[in-house]
Image (cartoon, grey):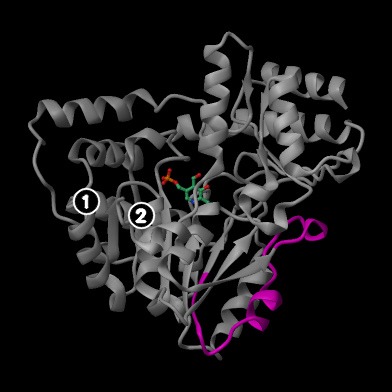
Amino acid sequence: QLRFADSLSRLGTESAFTVLARAQGLTAQGRDIINLGIGQPDFQTPPHIVEAGIKALRDGHHGYTPANGIPALREAVAADLHTRHGAEVNPGNVVVVPGGKPTMFFAVLMFGQPGAEIMYPNPGFPIYESVIRYSGATPVPIALREENDFAFEAETVLAQITPATRLIIINSPANPTGGVTPRREVDRFVAGLADHPHVAVLSDEIYSRMLYDGREHVSLLQYPEIRDRLIMLDGWSKTYAMTGWRLGYAVWPDAALDHATRLCINDHSCVNAAAQYAGLAALTGPQDAVDEMMRHFDARRRLIVEALNSLPGVRCTDPGGAFYAFPNIEGTGMSAAEAQDRFLDEAGVATVAGTSFGSHGEGYLRFSYANSAENITTAIDRIRAIL
Ligand code: PLP
């Protein structure tokens, strides 16, 4: 009998991967499955980025790099953040990691322990709650409300801060809701934080380039007053359709930088060198592929939101960012889990139950529109037939 650590029983998972495995299993059995469950762009990484990765391998970049990333890449990240957000970032504070997730894990490990409280969005990316529990800290949900288009409300968050609060995780544009936090709320949040100097903030901005209808992305980097306690996470996975390359970064405050570096050295040494050169080409090369991808996402977003709202018992708010729609399905009489299972089994449409994103996700289903317009239309028609 192996004696595993107790902490493992507290580690959760990301159900989108379970849904993906089930959908792939059904496809292998010959079923025609339309996957609206997966959280990755259905586009290929732009060719000039792929070529840069191949060139790096040919040029002999086969060894370890500095733990925090190659200097040129960290400088390119700082330059990009200056261009996009007007933020002054020291490349020395940029830590390149294998994807968006490691920063989450490291930030939570840095602040989480029994007795500590960590706030996280609910419904939200499931890994937040999972790693908070794993660390032994108490997860404190930040409820996001449909009536407010799932935007983060500063007051709700500030009211829950206690002396035990160590870290607040926020995410805009958000997974699974597509919610976008307006500048007004970020201003209020940052102003309120002045009364709580012991609280750090992890701002997950992985969807920072994915906004619609002229909405602006408000980066927390734009607030100098909290830079000494802000961890800003972003990366290449979604923007450049590079989920499989495993490349992401964070800007860490001075006080946490050495901890972050040591976590990298203990965990992965450095990111795959070729992926880093590909990431450099992504940031410094032409951006038209990103614009083109966003045009497609925007057209599909309009299509899916209108189609969902035409279904009996379903209503869907307008997602302002990312590539997800998060309709309320209570009117169908089904629970989120039941709808997820029936839509997959009976209609061949993979979606993810809102409850996979936290307790406040009951009554909702996440649809990723990273799929063709044709498939989206067919998927909704099949669901309509069931309803
Ligand atoms: N943060 C959010 C909000 C996400 O939705 C995701 C991926 O779905 C990530 C981070 C993780 O991205 P990565 O695949 O780069 O680890």
Q: Nearer the viewer, residue 179 or 267?
A: 267
Q: Which residue is depicted at the point 47% across and 66% down?
A: 132
Q: Nearer the viewer, residue 353 or 366?
A: 353
Query: Relative to 172, is 230 on the left or the right?
Result: left
Q: Is residue 286 visible?
A: no
Q: Are marks 2 and 1 in contact (CB under 8 Å)?
A: yes
What residue is pinned by disc 2?
Answer: 102
Q: Is residue 228 visible?
A: yes
What residue is pinned by disc 1?
Answer: 268
The image shows residue 17, relative to residue 203, as above or below, that is above
Instruction: Give, as a single range, the part of the protein colored magenta.
Output: 144-168
Image-quadrant location for residue 59:
top left
Residue type marked 1: His
SS for callout 1: loop
The image shows residue 275, relative to residue 126, as above or below, that is above
Looking at the picture, how far across and down is residue 237, in whole percent? 42, 40
The image shows residue 49, relative to residue 136, as above or below, that is above
Looking at the picture, how far across and down is residue 141, in whole percent? 63, 68
| Quadrant holding the C terminus | top right
The image shows residue 19, relative to residue 151, as above or below, that is above
Disc 2 crowd rating (10 Å Cα; few below 14, some 14-19, many 20+) is many
Q: Which residue is depicted at the point 45% across and 58% down?
A: 9
Image-quadrant location for residue 36:
top right
Residue type marked 2: Pro
Instruction: State yes or no: residue 8 in magenta.
Output: no
Query: Relative to 90, is 321 on the left or the right?
Result: right
SS for callout 2: helix
